[in-house]
Amino acid sequence: ILYNLGTSIYSTTSFLTTDNEINGNWISAPTSSIHEARLKAKAKRRLRKNSSRDSGRGDSLSDSSDPVRGSSVPPSSPRGKLLDRKSRLGKGRGLPKKGGGRRKGVWGSPGEVYDLEEVDVQDPNYDEDQENCVYETVVLPLGEDEFDRTVTPIVQEYFEHGDTNEVAELLRELNLGSMHSEVPMLAISLALEGKASQRELTSLLLSDLCRRVLTRSDVESSFDKLLKALPDLVLDTPGAPQLVGQFIARAVADQILSSSYIESYKGRVDCEHARAALDRAAILLKMNQGSGLRIDNLWGTGGGQRPVIQLIKEVNLLLKEYLLSGDPVEAERCLRDLEVPHFHHEFVYEAIVMVLESKGDRTLQIVLQLLKYLCMSTVITVDQMRRGYERVYMDIAEINIDVPSAYSILEQFVDSSFSAGIINRNLRDACPCRGRKRLVSEGDGGRLKLEIC
């Protein structure tokens, strides 16, 4: 009986102790205390887990197991960001490491100079021929289409600035290859359709390029092609044979063509245009030797580079030829060839003076017709026309000394010009008229008075 009682007491004691054991520890507290111990253990585990990333944030655990934010770190501080990888020591200026170099996808820090990489002989990809290689930039030779698209703008710009050195530098940068002989031909072809000043610039360009970019054989080959292409050039430029002949004569005078070039074609020319060009060149060279004609100034000096006295002589010659022919179209062409649009007021001045000095009404009508034609075709601008008339108004007193009837003729011409629409009303009203003597009323005693109208 005692044995059975002891066994039951032991069993009852074991049951009670089993309920008070947590994690191998004996706890004599009630059930509520066991629940609080579990919460505290869980909070401690969470605190140990986040201690590494939450260090320095000022967090702490109060006695009631509630985390408390420290007052030393504000909420907006960078330290308060989650997973912040910046230094918390307060050092540095915020610049990237190593100056921004040695990162993935970069060549290195700015301004870094790399040494030449030495060839590794032990490299499986090593090739002995690599050490003997010379790397250069290769420019492909120009084709016919590329040559026209590239060189034509260069020549056209040269007609504007006239700098042969710039053209030579641009041509050196191109790989002309077998197209060297095409350069003179292209320049002359463009000059045939241009003005006399552009032909003079072309002759100067060929002379300079022959000593720097082209050879004599290139120039001779180019003129050979020009003589063969004359039948096609005549279609666009009827005077092409004479102009090409002048280019040949100028080239011989500049010593970029041999003196025997023309003689080499004797008896071997079947084309009449080529024969006319060679004959023109031969005649000019003979005139150069006999009469002292300057072949080096064959085309003349274009534009405003000529002296004013020479321009005035050419204007007077142009007007005299027009009075004989009466062809305003030819006069317009000759005026354009002078290439002096800023000097057209001199043309108007000389034309009006020629009317004042002439006798008869024919000169007045034919000059009036010419000025109207040039005004309508806008060859002479309104400003140039006005300046020409104003110059006559200023010099009319001196002209009247040689031409007594200059005032009356000028007044008649100005009225006709206004009726034809050449000048405006203000310019017509500004025309001066000579003072006339007349008798006035009886109270003047018969004295003569001057009336200025």
Image (cartoon, grey):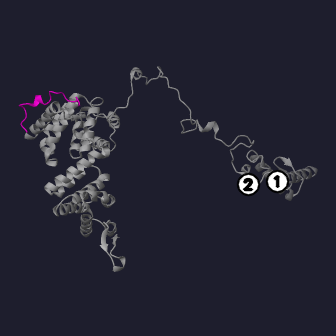
Residue corresponding to mark 2:
76
Query: Which segment is the magenta one?
Result: 254-271
| Residue 366 placement: quadrant | bottom left
Was residue 315 drawn as part of the magenta stretch in this picture?
no
> Is residue 209 shown left or right of residue 244?
right
Was residue 263 drawn as part of the magenta stretch in this picture?
yes
Tell me residue 375's x, y (percent): 26, 61
User: Which mark is first along the chain, 1 or 2?
Assistant: 1
Report, in whole angstroms, how far the alpha carbon at label 2 lies from the one at label 1: 12 Å
* Residue situated furthest bottom in the rendering: 442
Residue 384 shows in the view: no
SS at circle 2? loop
SS at circle 1? loop
As rendered, which of 28 and 278 lies closer to the eye?
278
Tell me residue 344's x, y (percent): 29, 54
As rendered, which of 162 and 79 lies closer to the eye?
162
Residue 364 shows in the view: yes
Q: Is residue 393 above or below residue 425?
A: above
Residue 71 - label: 1
Q: Which amino acid does label 2 sit on?
A: Ser
> Is residue 268 shown left or right of residue 29?
left
Tell me residue 270's x, y (percent): 6, 36
Q: Which amino acid does label 1 sit on?
A: Ser
Q: Would you say the magenta stretch is mainly helix, strand or loop?
A: loop
> Is residue 300 shown left or right of residue 98?
left
Q: In this view, does 364 lie above or below 206?
A: below
Quadrant of the snapshot with the C terminus:
bottom left
